Amino acid sequence: LKLLNERGSPNSAEVLWRMARAYNELFCAEKDDKKKREAHARAGTNAANKAVELDPTSAAAHRWKGIMLGRAVDFMALKEKVAAGVTIRESFEKAYELAPTSAYAAFCLGQWFFHVGELSWVERKAAKMVFGNFPENPYADAAKLFDTCASLAGSDKDFVVPVQNLVTLGKCHAALKQKDQAKEALQKAVALAPARPDEMEALEEGKKLLAKL
């Protein structure tokens, strides 16, 4: 991030979405300080917003706009959070439209549908008022995108969270009462050997989920 600030152009979409990505790494690394996490989330969102403004055809810029706004919703009130959900979906849909062979784009859009499925009754009611045509079966929609992501992951050098993809796919199948498919996804996940801390966390979660099925 320091290098990007010192050497990168503030008028380059490529630099700005990479800054957003760097802020995301800082957000994930900061486990305990809520104020710092919020600051990283908002700074990353601002950088990604500028990247999209400078280059509306950049799939990465749209993807990081959605990711960082998704981080920022943790610090929003319910009404603001629901409104942000619309923008997050639009950002991920645009990223997927611009890069249909990107595993990352499929994963991010799948995550949006998965989190819709995880909404509480109150959040779901508020979301329906905003979205209008609310997803009828978000877990099924998410599972299709995670399947697509898994099929593209090997050819997408930017995709670094295959364990998280498979674990969340397993969760979707479990929510849909598809036990065999859930087991298959989780078995594939725990067979991987990740190096990233967030992937190792997902691996442990996958093992626990698999033991319960």
Image (tube, rainbow, N blue to C red):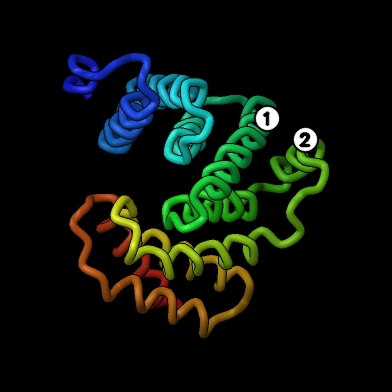
Marked residue nearer the N-terminal end (2 or 1): 1
> Foreground residue, 91 or 37?
91
| Mark 2 vs 1: CB contact within 8 A | yes
* Point 81% across, 37% down: residue: 129
Task: Report which quarter residue 24 is drawn in.
Answer: top left
Residue 127 image offset from top left, x and y in percent:
73, 40
Can you see residue 38?
A: no
Instruction: Reply above or below: 101 against 144.
Output: above
When the figure is inspected, residue 9 is found, relative to residue 163, above or below; the finding is above
Alpha carbon of mark 2 to alpha carbon of mark 1: how far? 7 Å
Residue 34 located left or right of residue 119: left
Is residue 25 left or right of 85 when viewed as pictured? Answer: left
Under mark 2, the amino acid is Val
Q: Amino acid at mark 1?
A: Ala
Q: Is residue 211 above or below residue 104?
A: below
Q: Which residue is mark 1?
A: 83
| Apparent side of residue 57 relative to residue 120 in the rendered image (left or right) | left
Residue depicted at 47% across the width and 21% down the height: 54
| Residue 44, quarter of picture | top left
